[in-house]
Image (spheres, helix red, strand yellow):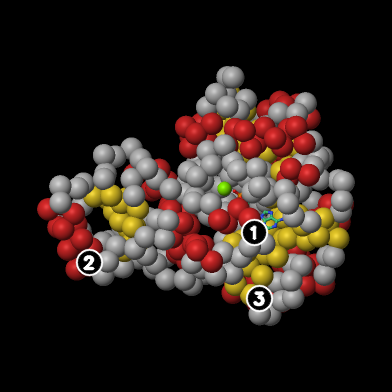
Amino acid sequence: METILIPVDKTLDNKKKYKQAVDILTSGGVVAFPTETVYGLGALATDEQAVQKIFEAKGRPSDNPLIVHIGNKEDVSNYATGITEDAEKLMTAYWPGPLTLVFDKIPGVIASNVTPGVETVGIRMPDHPVALELLRALAGPLAAPSANRSGKPSPTEAAHVYEDLKGLIPFILDGGQTGIGVESTVLDMTTSPPTILRPGGTTQEMIEAIIGPVRAGSKSPGEQAPRSPGMKYMHYAPEAPLFVISPDTTTIREAVETLHREGKRVAIIGPDDLDVLAADWYFAVGPRNNNDAMASHLYRALRQCDLTEADIILAVETDLTGVGAAVMNRLIKAADGKRYID
Ligand code: AMP
Ligand code: MG
């Protein structure tokens, strides 16, 4: 299959391009498109065979539910019930935005393979002009996971999508680099209080400012909330083994020395100003303690490691404030729980 990559930006007349994308979607195909978090791979969420193509293109385990993307807030009631007052408040405050809300689903509307094995459906309204334009032109819901091969870091540029899915999907809308860089927060509204199933672009602090205390799922990958089946899979992983390491410069320097003595080449993912000249490759992810910058640059850095000959990757940890919770959640998964201890 030929994969067409088409740029869309404000200076171009894009009508034809959206029409092309909509034609593919309504005839049961898949299309990759940018959102404010990462690129998504969309299929019409009411079309079971189209949705099946997402799982095939990604190599995604079929028991891992997909998020349904909508173009208008009101559409949520077409697919979900039990929309509480708290949910309404969150939608008013943060939609469009990187917040997926999990509700009880209305049976028989969304294709069953979108939400395998669960009676719930995760819904969000993305905050990206291209995603919104596509959804409005389609006038239907898009089931869309991240547009990467399953297990790989999520794509934050159209080129990443092309790398992973070339020959497997027909069409990519290229809207440039995504902003937030990590996926949406998944918040289960069917529990009381609501439960964060996956930390993401909308922080716990932001949610609690609107509806008060919520339950935060375990941050360690071994004990993820069973209500979020997808959380059990290793994810975001570059090819070389990755270890999370403390931000202490001496620890990092000694780690590099030790690894070099063992004949290993080392790539480091860390803040701009880290003073470790001995690393074989260094991928900077923004100023120290700037978790927003780190979120935005992390997946690209993970992919850059795959272009090196590194035998081991050390990723410098950050604190859990704001989007730091999401960043560390992804890093711990990419590391499969491994920490470098000297
Ligand atoms: P991705 O589409 O790759 O960003 O992953 C979506 C993730 O959202 C899944 O792996 C689940 O962890 C979570 N999710 C989506 N829908 C539901 C749902 N109905 N119930 C629980 N978790 C969900
Ligand atoms: Mg994903």
Residue type indicated by callout 2: Asp
Residue 273 locus on image (x, y percent): 27, 61
Is residue 149 in view from this perspective? yes
- Name the foreground residue: 27 vs 210: 27
Is residue 19 in view from this perspective? no
Q: Mark 3 falls on what kind of element? A: loop
Residue 202 as seen in the image, left or right of residue 264: right
Q: Which residue is mark 3?
A: 214
> Does the residue at mark 1 contact the one at mark 2 (Cβ under 8 Å)?
no
Disc number lying in front (3 or 1)? 1
How much space separates mark 2 and mark 3, taking CA atoms? 36 Å
Residue drawn 20% across and 52% down?
A: 279
How much space separates mark 3 and mark 1, taking CA atoms? 16 Å
Residue type indicated by callout 3: Val
Residue 318 locus on image (x, y percent): 39, 67
How much space separates mark 1 and mark 2, taking CA atoms? 34 Å
Residue drawn 18% across and 54% down?
A: 259
Seen as rendered, the residue at the extreme left is 261
Question: Which quarter of the rendered image does ligand 1 occupy?
Answer: bottom right
Q: Residues within 10 Å of mark 3 (few under 14, many from 20)?
A: some
Q: Quadrant of the C terminus?
A: bottom left
Examine the image and state in which quarter residue 8 appears: top right
Residue drawn 59% across and 41% down?
A: 60
Seen as rendered, the residue at the extreme top is 2
Residue 228, numbered label: 1
Asked if residue 249 is positioned above or below residue 309 in the image, the reply reads below
CB of residue at label 1: within 8 Å of ligand 1?
yes
Seen as rendered, the residue at the extreme bottom is 212
Q: Residues within 10 Å of mark 2 (few under 14, many from 20)?
A: few
